[in-house]
Each structure stands twice: as C-alpha cells, then as structure tokens.
Image (cartoon, rainbow, N blue to C red):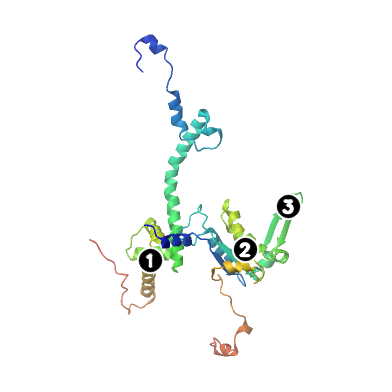
Amino acid sequence: MVLLSAPRWLRSRLSDRFWRVQEVLKYARHFRGRKNRCYKLAVRSVRRAFVKSTKARREKKRFLRALWITRIEAASLEHGLKYPAFISNLLKSQVELNRKMLADLAIYEPKTFKSLAALAQRRRQEGFLAALGDGKEPEGIFSRIVHHY
Amino acid sequence: MASYTKAAQQWATFARAWYLLDAKMQPPGKIAAATVIRLEGRHKPIYHALSDCGDHVVIINTRHIAFSGNKWEQKVYSSHTGYPGGFKQVTATQLHLKDPTAIVKLAVYRMLPKNLQRRTMMQRLHLFPEDVIPEDIEKNLLQEIPQPRAVPRRLDEYTPEEIAAFPRVWTP
C-alpha cells in the first residue's frame, strides 16, 4: 500500500497480520490441543518442533542404519548365516555394497540376496580352510584379491 | 506393473503366520529369546517397529521346561499386591506348581521391548502346559521353530550296541 504523506504513514496499522499468523499456524495444524489453533501457544510449539526436527536429522541416520542391519540380519538368517559372518565375508570378497543396498536387495531381489549369502558362505569356508589347513590345499577362488590400480 | 500374482505375493509377504515351539527340556530363557524374535517380526526382511509385522507363536509343553543350575530353588519371582505388607516372593518351583505357563509367560513379557506394542505381542503368544492344543489353533500352524537346546539322551535311552561301540577313553 502506498502511503503518500507522513501523517498517513503515522496513522497506518498492521494490515497483513492474518497472513503473518497463518505462516506459523500452518505448521501447527496437526498438533494436539490448543496449540494447533492459538497463535501464542503455537509459536512456542512450532519453534520446538523445528528444533527437534533439526537435531533429529543426525539421529535419523543412526536409526536407519540400525533398521537396515536388522533387516539384513533377518534375511541372512533365512539363508543360514549370521549377520557378522555375512558382512565380514562379503567385504573380504570385495563386494562393497552398503547396508542400505543390501537391505533393499533383501526385500526386492531375494534371489540376488541368496546368491550373495552363498558367496559369503563360500568365502567363509575358504577362510576356515586357509586357517586350519596346512597350506597343501590350493588357495581359495573367492579369496583372491583383485587390485584396481 | 500390475499382475494378479504380484498381489497374491504381497498378501503372502504381509500375512501373519503361526509358529509352533516345543518347550520340552528347554531352558525358558532361550525359548523366550526365540519367540520374541518371531513376535516382533525381526525374522522378516520387511521388519519395521511400527508396521505390526509380528507373527503368532504357540508354545507347548511349558510344564516340562528345564532350568539349568539350581534355579528351580534359587530363582525368585517377586510381586506386590499394592496393599501394605503385600510384598510376595515365590521360588520358581512354587510358581511353576501354581501355574505351569507363568514362567515362560513372564520370561517372554520381560524380553519384549517395553513399548505399547508389548501387550499386543503378548496377545499373539499362546501357551499350553501339555501337548494338547485346541483344534482351531492347530489348524493355523504353519511351521515349527527348531528347539534352541539339543536335548541330551539319558543313559537308559542308549541301546546296548551303542554303549559297546563307544570308544574306551581310559581303562579302569
């Protein structure tokens, strides 16, 4: 609004209060109690909600990783392997899939996951043979390290 | 891409299954550990705490559980009635005689995560002191969970041929 003179400017009052209040209340609409309607209560709740959401972004990474690990553990137990054995043998076979991808494969690509579990099991057996055998047996096939340099 | 088989597969993935567990000569703690995994749904790759993916578990022969060590005499179950002077302590033997399913039930209840889903999961646990199961539950059973402890055989359960075939470790 264009106020053309000083007296008009001095007599003007806030005219867009509704929209300023709505900017805050729109984030509080799903809250419980009066703090989803009353501005004074909503301001405090919305600020706390934003602070919690900012801090939770760091916890979300931890939570999701724990969830992936639970899912991979469930899927690998279906194939007869425990999670530490599965992950360590997969890494020793230079299969560097992260836990997110392994969890997604376990859900949506069960046959692929089964073959990964078989690979880990085979590498585990080769590790046992290398540790317990006397070196007279041939080295394992999946124990060979591929150098990319 | 929609297809009728994919819908059926998804229904099967999210269905609630019924598992059987025989608790004869098993330690109740290991029984509880095996059932808690199934009740929570942690044996499924689609597990999530909020998605209610737990299954039913039926435990039979809870009267024949086997504590290790001297726990039958030494393990104490405490409770309080809420009234003054109402602190009750019973040994495992006394509790087992009063209610043959109570030990396993308490073990499972205390091993479950302490959240609001615990009561729902306890409702999906079915305990029976003996082999006898109601027909409608027996019809639902899908698979048996392997027993956590390998039950050793008593000396009189070995045949004389097996005893004779056992290698002599020392000569008396």
Residue at horizontal 52%, vertical 34%?
Answer: A36
Which residue has dot 2 on it? B126
* Disc 1 chain ID: A
Please state the horizontal and vertical placement of residue A4, each as a whole percent of the image: 34, 12
Which residue has dot 3 on it? B81
Out of B60 and A124, give the one closest to the viewer. Answer: B60
Residue type highlighted by circle 1: Lys
Could you tell me which secondary element the residue under label 1 belongs to? helix
Which residue has dot 1 on it? A111
Please state the horizontal and vertical placement of residue A92, each as a whole percent of the image: 34, 65
Please state the horizontal and vertical placement of residue B53, each as a whole percent of the image: 51, 57
Mark 1 nearby-residue class (10 Å; few <14, some 14–19, many ≥20):
few
Please state if B84 lies on the left or on the right of A114 as rendered. right
Image quarter hosting the C terminus of chain B: bottom right
Q: CA distance from mark 2 to mark 3?
A: 26 Å
Using the rendered image, report if marks 1 and 3 lie on a common chain.
Answer: no
Residue at horizontal 38%, vertical 13%?
Answer: A9
Residue type highlighted by circle 3: Thr
Using the rendered image, report if marks 1 and 2 lie on a common chain.
Answer: no
Image position of A48 with respect to B93: above or below: above
Please state if A47 lies on the left or on the right of A92 as rendered. right
Name the mark on residue A88: none
Out of A129 and B118, give the one closest to the viewer. Answer: B118
Could you tell me which secondary element the residue under label 3 belongs to? loop
Residue type highlighted by circle 2: His
**Residue B27 appears in view:** no
Out of A148 and A7, give the one closest to the viewer. Answer: A7
| Labels 1 and 2 touching (C-beta < 8 A) | no
Q: Quadrant of residue B32?
A: bottom right
Residue at horizontal 38%, vertical 66%?
Answer: A111
* Disc 2 chain ID: B
